[in-house]
Amino acid sequence: DYTVKWCRRQPVLAGLSEEGRILLWDMYTAPEDPTSLDDDSSFDAFAFAPRGDVLAAASGSTVRLFDWRRAEPIETSFDASGLVLSLKFSPDGKFIYLLNELSVSMTAFAWDAANGTARQLGTVPSISEAAKAKETHNSGAEILMHPGGRFVYFSNRGHDTVSVFRVDPAT
């Protein structure tokens, strides 16, 4: 099974293999042997930045950023507050939202593409402690961004709901 995503601004398709490797295919030539982003790591999630120049990849609670065209890491990496199962950039590329699977929470980072830095803004629960207590197993499943960047959607396993967070573009 592959998780596959395409970069909207560049002719590249990326896939996450069963082994957790991120593989890159040129969409024009579609080589049989894709480029591997990092052979030494196993990733759980990834996302392209809106400009198409950066790919963020999560391994456990660490998020690493890559210049995917060179298949090289950017020096920036940062830690989330839990196991990252899904991540998304805001449409304007100024924020990165992480789904922390086991803590059933979302962490937001301000992303400064020019300087290659990420600053944690905060973590919020996706469901209340009271709701968590009613289920034997709760975890986050997927995080999605509204195309206009106004909302972040977070699906909850166990609780079987979708939480919606309104985004304040100023913060």
Image (cartoon, rainbow, N blue to C red):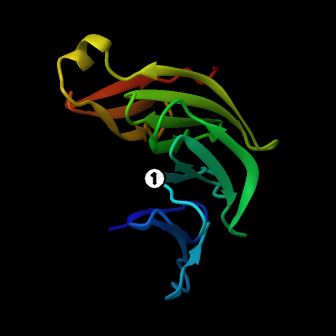
Looking at this view, is 119 or 170 the one in front?
A: 119
Q: Is residue 83 left or right of residue 75?
A: left
Height in image: 135 above or below 84? above
Question: Can you give x and y, in whole percent of width and height, for residue 144 in the image?
Answer: 41, 40
Q: Is residue 76 left or right of residue 16?
A: right
Instruction: Tell me where residue 73 appears, x and y as whole percent.
Output: 71, 58
Question: For residue 102, which quarter of the picture?
Answer: top left
Q: For residue 115, what is the image quadrant?
A: top right
Name the residue located 53 percent from the left edge and 40 percent from the top edge. 61
Q: Secondary structure at mark 1?
A: loop
Residue 81 position within the rendered picture, expressed as x and y whole percent measured from the top left = 53, 29
Residue 142, x across and y down, in percent: 36, 42
Q: Is residue 81 above or below residue 59?
A: above
Q: Nearer the viewer, residue 29 or 21?
A: 21
Q: Residue sitting at 53 percent across and 87 percent down? A: 31
Residue visible at 60% across and 45% down in the picture:
63
Instruction: Give the quadrant of the C terminus.
Output: top right
